[in-house]
Amino acid sequence: MQSDQALIIEFQASAHKEAPYTILLKRHQQKVYYQIKRMVTNHMDADDIAQQVWIKVWNKLDGFKMESEFTTWIFRIAYNETINFLQKQQKTGDHNLSDELIDYEQAASSTDHPKSSQIQITLETAIQQLPEKQRFVFMLRYFEEMNYEKIASITGTTVGGAKANYHQAIKKMEEIVKRA
């Protein structure tokens, strides 16, 4: 199996870019999608944002200098696209957190999981109530198990800032869960 770096070199050096790009897409699309989905919860919105991310990857991969890992770079693009989408929704008044929570609760309750899904719903509800940056940092740390250095690189903050955002997110989530 070729490394991401080898695929990027092949993409940059070749007139036939589709093959290495397709491998990168298949290798990373699920993680990118789920990271976005955790931020917006709506499948169609997450799908649209993910598509925009992969279009940007295609357009900018020739200029990728491999100064960071490919996953860091792509999560940074996903982060920026998601934040832009959420800010655009807030400006137009389309963003309705309670609708997203209802959508999530209906999807979670329609699964065949036992009552532990209630715990998951409570966790997801708490996550959705976090400010955008704290939510993204929490998800990268908790779900993707990334270290603070990588999170800082993705979110454009310092390591201390990433740690602070994560710990603030934890505190807020504890308060939200206690009230639930």
Image (cartoon, grey):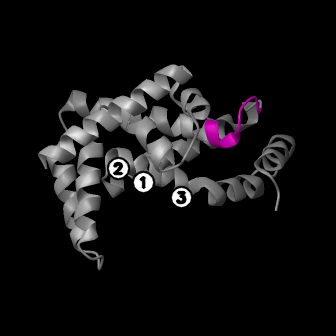
The answer for how far apart the CA atoms under marks 1 and 3 are is 11 Å
Q: Which segment did they paint magenta?
A: 66-72
Q: Are marks 1 and 2 in contact (CB under 8 Å)?
A: yes
Disc 3 target residue: 30
Disc 3 packing (10 Å; few <14; some 14–19; many ≥20): few
Q: Label 1: state its secondary structure.
A: helix
Closest to the observer, 60 or 72: 72
What's the amino acid at mark 1? Answer: Asp
From the viewer's perspective, tell me whether residue 146 is left or right of residue 101: right
The x, y position of residue 115, in whole percent, is 23, 72
Q: Is residue 64 left or right of residue 143?
A: right
Residue 57 found in image quarter: top right
| Residue 19 falls within the magenta-colored stretch | no
| Position of the N terminus by quadrant | bottom right
Q: Amino acid at mark 3?
A: Gln
Q: Is residue 159 visible?
A: yes
Please state the horizontal and vertical placement of residue 140, each as a whole percent of the image. 49, 42
Alpha carbon distance from label 1 to label 2: 5 Å
Residue 95 seen anywhere in this rendered image of the structure:
no
Horizontal arrangement in the rendering, residue 93 relative to residue 75 (left or right):
left
Point out residue 19 in the picture as x, y percentages from the top left corner. 76, 58
Residue identified by numbered label 2: 45
> Looking at the picture, how far across and down is residue 153, in whole percent?
59, 28
Compared with 106, 114 (above or below) is: below
Badge 2 density bin: few <14, some 14–19, many ≥20, Cα 10 Å = some
